[in-house]
Amino acid sequence: MNPSSDAAKPTAKDIAARYRKEIASGEREVGSRMPAARKLAKDLGVQLMTVQSAYNQLRDEGLVLSQQGRGTFVRDPAVPLGTEPGSSPAYVALAEELNSIHDTLRLLGERLDRLERVVGDATPPAQ
């Protein structure tokens, strides 16, 4: 993606697609730092907001993490979404909701076990 005066400038979607492909192929390793947004924007001849939008797309897809003051990094897919600093706010909210659902299901399972023990211990009614 080298800018030239004759070529159309890449869109945020184009930039995101490029890095999505690099991440999927392993060309960009887990934990590796993505290019600095300002430098990439300058190198591609696009606005900073274009690169930021591309990085936001990748973050929202769970492919990268943004850490203020440090940069954007390829996320480890083995780590549960929403648990690392810099995770997408949507994933953080989803992880919290899933944890709550998991806790509720565990409590319901415990109640069901107790009820089954009570019912199993009860003497059947005489007929």
Image (cartoon, rainbow, N blue to C red):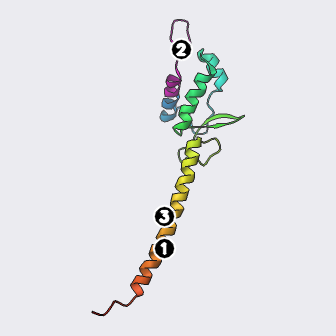
Question: Of the numbered discs in the image, which one, if any, rests on residue 54?
Answer: none
- Does the CB distance between marks 2 and 1 fall below 8 Å? no
Q: Which residue is mark 2?
A: 9
Secondary structure at badge 2 equals loop
Q: Which mark lies nearer to you, 3 or 2?
A: 3
Work out whether residue 124 can be spotted: yes
Q: Are marks 3 and 2 in contact (CB under 8 Å)?
A: no
Residue 46 pos. (x, y %)? 59, 17
Q: Which residue is mark 1?
A: 111
Q: Give the residue drawn at x 57%, y 27%.
A: 53
CA–CA distance between discs 3 and 2?
51 Å
So how many labels did they put on this image?
3
The residue that label 3 is drawn on is: 105
Which residue range is magenta in the image?
1-18
Say what amino acid the circle numbered 3 marks: Leu
Work out whether residue 15 or residue 88 is closer to the camera in this orientation and state it. Answer: 88
- The answer to whether any part of residue 80 appears in the image is no
Decide which of tag 3 and tag 2 comes sooner along the chain.
2
Residue 62: horizontal and vertical position, in percent?
53, 40
User: Which numbered mark, 2 or 1, is in the foreground of this view?
Assistant: 1
Amino acid type, mark 1: Arg
